[in-house]
Amino acid sequence: MVLGFELLIALLIILVAAEIFTNALEHLGERLGISEGVTGSLFAAVGTALPESTVPVVAVIAGGANAELNAEIGVGAILGAPLMLSTLSLCVMALSVLARRGLDGHLRPERTGLQRDLLFFLAAFAMAFVALFIPPELATVRAGLAVALVLNYFVYVMMTLRVSAQLVENGHGTEAHGLLFLQKIGLPQNMPVIVAQMALGLVLLIAGAKGFVYCVEHLSAILGISPLLLALLIVPIATELPEKVNSVIWIRRGKDTLAFGNITGAMVFQGSLLPALGLAITPWRPTPEVVAGVLITYGAALWLYWHARRESGGLRVWHLLVNGAIYVGYVGTMIALVIAG
């Protein structure tokens, strides 16, 4: 009973924090004169994904008597985040506008930016997958792939920034939705106040997510869920999904580019830099659970990329519901592996 109440409080904090953060971010993007692609795929995606990216690092650094298990948990957390983003997060975002837009309704993110995000993610995750099968003895090859993953993200950032000005000219500039919240209590609308509100939203978002993680971990202990299953399934949902409330808020306001960029930009960030980190500090070896997770993530991203290129009128709501069904299929596979093992 107490755990359920704490979980509800954590979710309420997350919802309030997401409103504060997205409001400030919109005003920041508008003031800087940057495109929605930069605001969503870089600022929002990295801002919300970076704090939770410490989960696998902490798991590995913990070491001690359970060093090998902690390393497995670290790998699971690294690969579980893109899995959740490419499937469940996109599905939840689509479900939030299902009643309004309908099953066959259009979703219209800026196409070139969405395709760029997905292409860079697919390239990064392919390298991360290949690296799973390279033995630790070939340290030079593994190091080369780690460097390539970092460079992949660097090039992605440069390309996203480079096209920003043209996108703004074409009508894809970031526009704020309403007044800055801190303006409503008498503060001016200037850069220090915008940054202060953004920092406040991010701090509350982290606090709410941490509380959510605490409740989920205790719930998993009560239910007797294994650490590896926790790392691959529960932790990514607990750490990533709450912070993607930003995307739900944006897509319900018709800001599809910001909504998608918040998720696909995080996919590139966590699909490039975190696997590079995994190669450096974990054994990074294949297990049935990990291989299944990577393949399903890749399939979900390919599905989205194919329809992003194919649909001239934009993606459809049902396309993202398929991504959710893919996640359900993965959960079923994981449960079957646990039972078989």
Image (cartoon, helix red, strand yellow):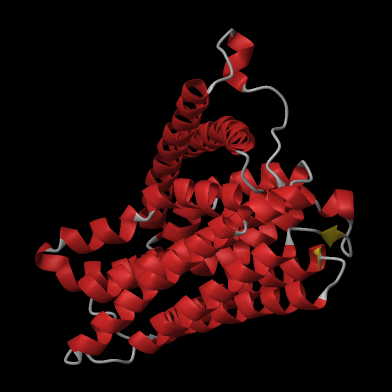
Name the foreground residue: 153 vs 127: 153
Looking at the image, the residue that sits furthest to the left is 65
**Residue 175 visible in the current orientation:** yes
Image position, residue 88 (x, y; %): 61, 63
Name which residue lies at 24% across and 92% down.
135
Residue 67 screen position, x and y as percent: 16, 69
* Residue 105 placement, left or right of 160: right
> Does residue 319 sit above or below 129 in this rendering?
above
Residue 338 x, y percent position in the rendering: 42, 79
How far across and down, in percent of the image, does residue 187 sit? 55, 11
Q: Which residue is drawn at 48% across and 60% down?
A: 157
Q: In this view, does 261 lie to the left or right of 200?
A: right
How many numbered discs, if any?
A: 0
Identify which residue is drawn at 50% across, 66% down.
156
Residue at image position (33%, 66%) is 227
Q: In which quarter of the image is the C terminus?
A: bottom left
123 vs 52, nearest the viewer: 123
Residue lying at the far top of the rendered structure: 186
Left or right, 269 with respect to 326, comes to left
Residue 229 visible in the picture: no
